[in-house]
């Protein structure tokens, strides 16, 4: 047949064939993603939204994600989302974006309310007030980890909080000048499960009378002291009173004399950091990077 190339079919597919493949073609078309398609993110299940919000952090949820729409607000109120509240080093606390103390305290109280008593970790910085500590004490008896950085809270308010936290396992007090040794002695009795303690220069409220009380924290595993006026005798009392110590870090504590006797006393401790011979008192700023032994490091150890 002239003009016809063999092997090439010019015949149109039969109607029965078209009807046979039509459902598959339609299915494939439905699966194609249209570049200009608009997705309604508000229709995501609450548990999925809560998982996403957990990656954002408390401040982002309170200031942004939770204000988008009604369904997102409902997801932002799921109590399990507020077990971990870290408001310590967020950018809203710094520079031009720094919020007023009242606004930040109100945000922290909202986070406490949304936790419905499930709050386990709270970290706050200079915006924290006595009133906020009292608010946490009345509503968060399940707290296991507390971090206060550069806070001018009173020793009375801190003590009132501590005695209401029987499950506390981790405590970080950094540059809080009015929290003194009495509070730690009370903590040793009230927080029987305390395993990790970190105190930074300024934590003892200047001059103090008597020992710190750390030697009565018999369940301690990790202890970090930075810039403390603790003496060699007091450190020995802590080592004797805390038989489970695995990590001891003592930096810039110039009243400690490091000799063979002290090193022998510390021989059972797995990780040991003692003051250097050139020890000198350093005035720290809250943003300094020298204080890096955060609780997250301890958890991963």
Image (cartoon, helix red, strand yellow):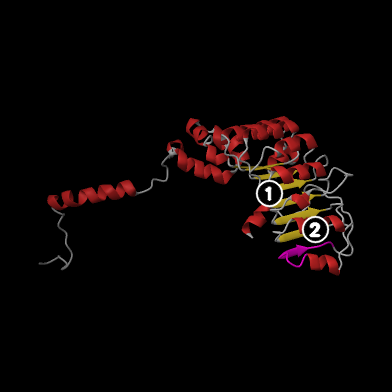
Q: CA distance from mark 2 to mark 1?
A: 19 Å
Residue 250 in view: yes
Q: Determine if the magenta segment contains residue 68.
A: no
For the N terminus, the quadrant is bottom left
Q: Which mark is residue 46?
A: none
Residue in the picture at 75% in, 41% down: 95
Residue 167 drawn above or below residue 274: above
Residue 127 visible in the displayed image: no
Residue 145, given in percent of the width and then of the height, sits at 66, 46
**Which residue is the site of mark 1?**
194
* Tag nearer the camera, 2 or 1: 1
Residue 274 within the magenta-colored segment of the rendering = yes
Residue 151 position within the rendered picture, expressed as x and y whole percent measured from the top left: 77, 40
159, 98: nearer the viewer: 159
Does residue 27 appear left or right of residue 238 in this picture? left
Screen quadrant of the C terminus: bottom right
Badge 1 marks a residue whose secondary structure is: loop
**Left or right: 271 as drawn, with respect to 116:** right
Secondary structure beneath dot 2 equals strand
Start-end of magenta stretch: 266-275
**Relative depth, front residue between 188 and 15:** 188
Q: Quadrant of residue 253?
A: bottom right
Residue 269 in the figure: left or right of residue 112: right
Residue 250: image tag: 2
Q: Earlier in the sequence, mark 2 or mark 1?
A: 1
């Amino acid at each position: 047949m002239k003009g016809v190339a063999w092997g090439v079919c010019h015949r149109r597919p039969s109607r029965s064939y078209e009807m046979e493949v039509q459902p598959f073609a339609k299915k494939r078309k439905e699966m194609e993603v249209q570049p200009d398609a608009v997705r309604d993110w508000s229709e995501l299940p609450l548990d999925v939204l809560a998982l996403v919000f957990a990656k954002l952090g408390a401040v982002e949820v309170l200031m942004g994600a939770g204000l988008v729409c009604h369904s997102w607000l409902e997801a932002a109120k799921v109590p399990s989302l507020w077990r971990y509240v870290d408001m310590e080093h967020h950018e809203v606390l710094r520079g031009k974006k720094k919020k007023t103390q009242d606004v930040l305290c109100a945000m922290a109280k909202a986070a406490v309310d949304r936790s419905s008593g499930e709050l386990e970790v709270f970290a706050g910085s200079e915006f924290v007030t006595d009133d906020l500590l009292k608010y946490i004490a009345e509503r968060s008896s399940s707290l296991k980890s507390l971090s206060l950085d550069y806070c001018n809270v009173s020793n009375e308010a801190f003590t009132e909080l501590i005695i209401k936290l029987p499950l506390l396992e981790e405590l970080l007090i950094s540059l809080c000048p009015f929290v003194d040794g009495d509070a730690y002695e009370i903590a040793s009795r009230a927080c029987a499960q305390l395993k990790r303690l970190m105190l930074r220069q300024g934590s003892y409220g200047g001059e103090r009378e008597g020992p710190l009380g750390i030697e009565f924290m018999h369940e301690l595993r990790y202890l970090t002291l930075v810039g403390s006026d603790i003496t060699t005798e007091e450190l020995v009392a802590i080592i004797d009173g805390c038989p489970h110590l695995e990590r001891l870090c003592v930096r810039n504590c110039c009243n400690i004399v490091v000799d063979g006797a002290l090193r022998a006393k510390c021989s059972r401790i797995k990780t040991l950091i003692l003051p250097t011979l050139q020890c000198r008192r350093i005035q720290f700023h809250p943003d300094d990077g020298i204080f890096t032994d955060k609780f997250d490091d301890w958890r991963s150890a």
